[in-house]
Image: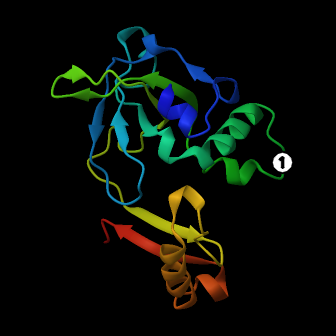
Amino acid sequence: KKKAEEAGIREEMHTPVGVGMFDCPVDRIGVSGGTAPFFSLVLSDDYQEGSKSANYYIGKDLSRATDELEFYEKLFETKGSRTEFFEPLLNFAFEYKGVLTTQERIDGIASGEDLQLLVLRNLFDGKKSLRLLDLKIGEATSAKNWQGKSAIRNRKQKVVDSGTNSKCEGFRLEGFESMP
């Protein structure tokens, strides 16, 4: 809870996911790109229904993804009442379950510190490999003091933005995993 409060995350701002839904504590997993750690979530036997395997969901450290919480909560609210205008876009969004408060398993034991995770659909579930594109959207892909970014790092990113198609096209391809 302390880390969440420091990051400005309040309990009433999100949909809580019951601890009994997943085996806890959780294990950190290695993923490429980005700054937010991801965690393996294993559905408890009682929650494995229909086509959902034990690894159907994945956890993303909320303290490094606070800007995503409002987006996913709004998406969650519109579930079942999507407007015709947003329907095509929303079909490409990750399935969002809510926020799980748990602990990380370190050297086989619980860390003792609460960890809040965005619970999202695990795209790797049931797949041997994925082809992933990392797209940066916007003319400017950085802002000073956003998620702790210093003025110097912000200036460096502005140079990158000006030398890529971010400036003229409004997006760029930042990364491509498992190219053909």
Quick check: 78 above or below 30? above
Element type where label 1 sits in the image: loop
Mark 1, other Cα within 10 Å: few <14 / some 14–19 / many ≥20: few
The residue sitting at 62% across, 41% down in the picture is 69
- Residue 106 image-quadrant placement: top left
Image quadrant holding the C terminus, namely bottom left
Quick check: 53 above or below 172? above
Quick check: 77 above or below 12? below
Q: Position of residue 25 (x, y in %)?
A: 31, 21
Query: Which residue is denoted by mark 1 in the rendering?
Result: 84
Along the line of sight, the residue nearer the viewer: 177 or 147: 147
- Residue 56 image-quadrant placement: top left
Left or right, residue 90 beside residue 156: right
The residue sitting at 48% across, 47% down in the picture is 64
Along the line of sight, the residue nearer the viewer: 132 or 180: 132
Quick check: 123 above or below 177? above
Left or right, residue 121 beside residue 5: left
Q: Position of residue 98 (x, y in %)?
A: 58, 28
**Residue 111 visible from this viewpoint:** yes
